[in-house]
């Protein structure tokens, strides 16, 4: 591992000179790579983007600073692509960074302040020409994709986290994380024609991530209380709003074609698992897809459908720089590793 | 040597004893007193200064009032950062948090005492040095390993290192005076305004003093923020500060050399917490209010010739109120009250041999016991209700042979916790040794070697044991092993020039280091005993004072230090930070302080430099916090109104080159600023 670390350190040093690398010159389209959001640590202003080039297998850390000429900010919490743009949600800085989906350079920074108080945005979803941003002050902000104006605020539950759209409805996980130990257990259902909350559904303690399958069913991770109540996956039927609770461990969910990858990191034992879940049959089809023996802290997952590769994000011990590992889903074997920034979590692909 | 003295209370005995020097009357006074406290009286020091400095071992660094003035310090933190091996963390602003660590041991390993009474904070383990002001200080003394004084509180003697301060209000009046008065007015940038006054009246064989202080600042200082290629000038917000304290003290000398002192002080601090500078988010509205009542008293006496006892008691009630009015919980705020109470009682003894009227210091002995009862009440029902019983003791001796001095002690600590609201922290029992050997001064030999080892520990704080989600009741004490070699070149005085140089090299090993690590996810951290830190370093200090025979009123003082500190994480050889420099410990620190004076007029230049540091233990470029050099300049004029009244006027330009810097990442320090100070003293 030290050899690998040394190698990547050399790569990092070698690549940190902007002029010497064509991929981080201004306004150069990015191809065959992925942008990794590295959260950094709260109050350290050290959230970064790492761009990984699949052709050279190089990770260009601090890509945003090198190309946009300023720092990304404090504690990036989410990042997703929508159309030709990528949206990074900066929790500590209370901004939404609109980044070119072609060059990776900033297009616009949207300030998320409310009468001088930071709204602390957490996650992002999209609906038609609207950017929907959950904010820790109990609202979802509706932002126009063209003007970047915040058009309205939808009141939801306490400290909303993940959100996803299904059948013209927005499902927002209300964590209540700042009311600890009185955590929330609900998901807000928002009507996207009126932009108002219709109802709240009780799903389980501490809802966090939300994902939707091809049928429109809504899946919610409930993280529990990190003690006696475990972290689990739940399903909401969008028609009946009935909730199904699954009994396997799950701390993250991402789509892999029609299936889900279910990630789980057991902090007590140090074990990490990635399982395959079939949302049609609601069954785990492979409980240990990948050989994660080299992963310390599974902190994020992504699947690239064209390359047919799974990317596992390792946050290590949260205070040292992390890695992204590439896996072949058919063999479960690691095929590449990339040394990136501090606390990597989210991935967006540039094809 | 007026500028800085490296002085040891005990070593005075040793050197005079071995050389069979008749004890001068002033020295007798030193012995009578609480070591460093009365040692600071000018009459004492001036009379025997050169003898002392020639003969002492520099276990301690002592700064007296005029040195403190020349260092241009507004708080104790600014003084201590000029001492070798010291690493200061400052979060910026008047009264902002400043903590101190020496030789990588961490702030919790330092014991702080004022007027011989220990200052505790069992909630956080740290005392904010930014809130201890300098205008009433008579001296500051800092020592690694052994305490400066065998009659000091046991908790100070057994700590990894100790800082002792003495104040005007608690020192006895010289025999010739019946009234003493001190006052100071300061005005400076960012709305700084402060006033201090203290009066002390002789009452028969004792004194009564009253004192008060008030200071405030709006704290809206501009700072430069570098972000990529852009540098913008912004202003710190929510950084207002106001503090005040009042108190009274008395002292009395009874028959048979019995000294009694008592002191009451209460203070209140209200301040905004500006927090870290977060890019693109300038909101800050947290508030902190601290009220404190302190009652302390001691009695010391000479039981028989050269056998001294001291008993002391301190009762402290410290309340903090933290308010975050815009916290994004359902309540919409955090409104928490913390009350930390401490009762400290102890007794110490010190004795040495005597042969007729010549003191024979071949064997000295000392001992002490102390009990500290402390508790914490928190308005948050999730927090524990801890009560701590902490008993400590020390027994030591010093023996002086023909060529070497030997000293050693062993201390013991027993801690028992009670928690009415749940599980309690572990009970602790430990024995900690200290041994030292040093060469004696030989004829024409100005060098002295000293070698010592000390084992010490620090008990986990209440926050580390019990804080919501983070605390861990399974914590063990953090242990420190210190190995030190010191070589001192004794001050010599030739052609009106005094010169002192001292070097140290050391190796420290800290085991069971208490660190916060994430356990469930990034938002759920826990305190764990997982760290092992190895630190080695070198320090060199030099002090020159020059006067000129043609013009004796013309004086030059130079005081400089350089410290090298390599402090590495050796916890896990497979970890990415293995053998990386520990966060926020610079490899190099140094200062050069220069003063030129002619009669009462003078100019001073103070320079302080810190090399780059890392904000986390991983030593990469992203974590780098740039080093800095800060220069302060001052002009001052000291003059007498009448023979007994002196006035000092000083103008200081701080951070003269408007350097943009920070000790802690995202906590910016002020740029160029000024401070005008007028002091008046009667007697």
Image (cartoon, coloured by chain):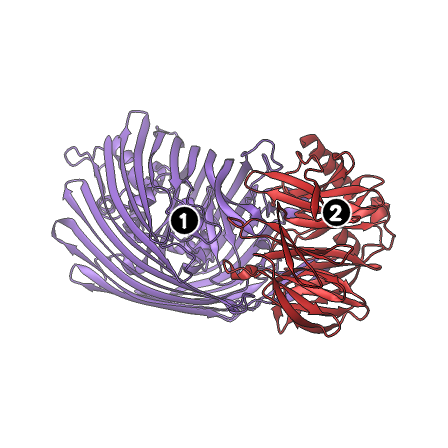
Chain colours: A red, B purple
Residue B138 in which image quadrant: bottom left
* Residues at marks 1 and 2 touching, judged by CB atoms closer than 8 Å: no
**Dot 2: what SS?**
strand
Q: Is residue B407 visible?
A: yes
Residue sitting farthest toward the left:
B255
Chain designation of label 2: A
In front of the other: A262 or B350: A262
Work out whether residue B45 or residue A50 is closer to the camera in this orientation and state it: A50
Residue B461's label in the rendered image is 1
Q: Residue A182: x percent and y percent? A: 50, 60
Q: How far apart are marks 1 and 2 (CA)?
A: 42 Å
> Label 2 neighbourhood size at 10 Å, few (<14), some (14-19), many (20+)?
many
Q: Residue at x 60, y 51 (%)?
A: B628
Q: Percent x, y for residue B366?
A: 24, 38
Q: Quadrant of the C terminus of chain B?
A: bottom left
Residue B382 in picture, x, y percent from top left:
43, 57
Asked if residue B192 lies left or right of residue A288, the reply is left
Residue B69 sits above or below residue B561 on the image:
below
Q: Is residue B193 above or below residue B394?
A: below
Tag 1's secondary structure?
Answer: loop
Q: Name the residue under label 2.
A: A302
Q: In which image quadrant can residue A101 be found? A: bottom right
Pointer 1 local density, CA inside 10 Å: few below 14, some 14–19, many at least 20 = some
At 36% from the left and 65% from the top, the residue drawn is: B267
Asked if B91 appears above or below B579 in the picture, the reply is: below
The disc numbered 1 marks a residue on which chain?
B
């Amino acid at each position: 591992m030290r050899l690998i670390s040394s190698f990547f350190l050399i790569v990092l040093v070698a690549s940190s000179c902007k002029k010497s690398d064509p991929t981080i010159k201004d306004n150069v389209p990015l191809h065959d790579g992925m942008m990794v959001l590295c959260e950094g640590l709260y109050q350290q202003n050290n959230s970064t983007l790492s761009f990984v080039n699949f052709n050279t297998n190089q990770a260009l850390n601090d890509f945003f600073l090198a190309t946009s000429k300023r720092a990304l900010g404090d504690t990036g919490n989410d990042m997703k692509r929508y159309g030709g743009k990528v949206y990074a949600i900066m929790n500590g800085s209370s901004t939404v960074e609109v980044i070119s989906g072609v060059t990776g350079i900033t297009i616009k920074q949207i300030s998320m302040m409310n009468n001088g108080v930071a709204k602390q945005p957490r996650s992002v979803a999209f609906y038609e020409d609207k950017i929907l941003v959950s904010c820790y002050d109990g609202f979802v902000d509706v932002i126009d994709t063209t003007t970047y104006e915040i058009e309205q605020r939808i009141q939801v539950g306490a400290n909303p986290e993940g959100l996803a759209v299904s059948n013209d409805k927005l499902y927002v996980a209300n964590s209540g994380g700042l009311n600890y130990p009185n955590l929330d257990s609900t998901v807000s259902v928002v009507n996207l024609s009126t932009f108002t909350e219709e109802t709240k559904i009780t799903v389980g303690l501490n809802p966090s991530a939300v994902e939707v399958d091809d049928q429109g069913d809504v899946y919610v991770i409930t993280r529990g209380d990190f003690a006696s109540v475990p972290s689990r996956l739940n399903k909401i039927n969008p028609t009946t709003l009935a909730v199904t609770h699954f009994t396997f461990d799950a701390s993250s969910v991402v789509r892999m074609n029609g299936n889900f990858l279910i990630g789980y990191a057991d902090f007590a034992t140090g074990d990490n698992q990635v399982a395959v879940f079939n949302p049609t049959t609601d069954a785990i089809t492979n409980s240990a897809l990948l050989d994660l023996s080299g992963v310390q802290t599974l902190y994020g997952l992504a699947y690239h459908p064209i390359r047919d590769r799974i990317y596992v994000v390792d946050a290590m011990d949260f205070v040292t720089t992390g890695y992204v590992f590439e896996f072949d889903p058919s063999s479960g074997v690691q095929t590449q590793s990339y040394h990136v920034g501090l606390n990597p979590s989210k991935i967006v692909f540039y094809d | 040597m007026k500028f800085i003295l490296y002085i040891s209370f005990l070593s005075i005995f040793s050197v005079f004893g071995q050389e069979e020097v008749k004890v001068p009357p002033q020295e007798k006074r030193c012995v009578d007193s609480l070591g460093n406290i009365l040692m600071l009286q000018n009459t004492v020091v001036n009379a025997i200064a050169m003898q002392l400095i020639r003969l002492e071992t520099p276990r301690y660094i002592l700064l007296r009032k005029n040195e403190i003035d020349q260092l241009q310090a507004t708080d104790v933190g600014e003084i201590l950062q000029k001492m070798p091996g010291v690493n200061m963390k400052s979060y910026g602003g008047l009264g902002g948090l400043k903590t101190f660590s020496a030789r990588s041991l961490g702030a919790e390993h330092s014991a702080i005492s004022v007027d011989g009474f220990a200052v505790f904070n069992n909630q956080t383990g740290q005392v904010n040095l930014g809130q201890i002001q300098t205008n009433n200080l008579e001296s500051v003394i800092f020592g690694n390993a052994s305490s400066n004084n065998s009659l000091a509180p046991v908790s100070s003697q057994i700590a990894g290192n100790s800082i002792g301060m003495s104040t005007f209000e608690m020192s006895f009046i010289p025999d010739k005076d019946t009234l003493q008065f001190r006052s100071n007015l300061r005005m400076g940038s960012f709305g700084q305004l402060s006033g201090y006054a203290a009066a002390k009246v002789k009452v028969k064989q004792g004194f009564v003093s009253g004192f008060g202080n008030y200071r405030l600042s709006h704290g809206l200082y501009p700072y430069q923020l570098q972000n990529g290629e852009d540098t913008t000038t912004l202003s710190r917000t929510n950084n207002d500060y106001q503090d005040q304290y009042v108190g009274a003290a008395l002292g009395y000398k009874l028959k048979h050399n019995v000294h009694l002192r008592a002191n009451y002080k209460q203070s209140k601090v209200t301040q905004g917490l500006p927090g870290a500078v977060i890019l693109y988010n300038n909101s800050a509205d947290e508030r902190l209010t601290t009220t404190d009542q302190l009652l302390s008293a001691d009695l010391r006496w000479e039981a028989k010739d050269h056998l001294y006892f001291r008993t002391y008691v301190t009762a402290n009630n410290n309340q903090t109120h933290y308010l975050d009015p815009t916290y994004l919980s359902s309540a919409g705020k955090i409104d928490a009250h913390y009350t930390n109470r401490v009762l400290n009682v102890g007794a110490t003894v010190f004795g040495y041999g005597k042969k007729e009227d010549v003191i024979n210091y071949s064997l000295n002995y000392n001992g002490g016991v102390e009990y500290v009862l402390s508790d914490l009440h928190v308005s948050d029902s999730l927090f524990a209700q801890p009560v701590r019983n902490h008993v400590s003791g020390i027994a030591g001796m010093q023996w002086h042979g023909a060529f070497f001095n030997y000293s050693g002690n062993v201390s013991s600590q027993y801690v028992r916790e009670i928690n009415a609201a749940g599980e309690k922290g572990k009970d602790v029992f430990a024995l900690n040794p200290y041994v030292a050997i040093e060469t004696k001064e030989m004829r024409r030999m100005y060098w002295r070697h000293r070698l010592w080892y000390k084992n010490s520990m620090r008990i986990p704080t209440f926050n580390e044991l019990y804080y919501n989600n983070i605390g861990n009741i399974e914590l063990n004490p953090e242990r420190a092993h210190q190995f030190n070699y010191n070589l001192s070149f004794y001050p010599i005085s030739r052609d009106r020039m005094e010169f002192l140089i001292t070097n140290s090299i050391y190796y420290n090993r800290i085991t069971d280091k208490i660190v916060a690590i994430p356990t469930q996810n990034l938002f759920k951290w826990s305190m764990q005993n997982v760290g092992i830190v190895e630190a080695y370093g070198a320090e060199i200090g030099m002090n020159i004072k020059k006067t000129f025979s043609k013009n004796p009123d013309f004086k030059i003082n130079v005081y400089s230090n350089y410290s090298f500190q390599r402090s590495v994480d050796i916890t896990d050889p497979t970890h990415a930070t293995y053998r990386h420099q520990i966060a926020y410990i610079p490899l190099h620190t140094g200062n050069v302080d220069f003063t030129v004076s002619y009669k009462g007029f003078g100019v001073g230049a103070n320079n302080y430099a810190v090399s780059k540091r890392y904000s986390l233990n991983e030593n990469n470029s992203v974590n780098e916090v740039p080093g800095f050099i800060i220069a302060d300049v001052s002009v001052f004029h000291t003059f007498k109104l009448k023979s007994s009244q002196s006035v000092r006027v000083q103008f200081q330009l701080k951070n003269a080159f408007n350097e943009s810097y920070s000790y802690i990442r995202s906590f910016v320090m002020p740029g160029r600023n000024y401070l005008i100070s007028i002091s008046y003293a009667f007697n």
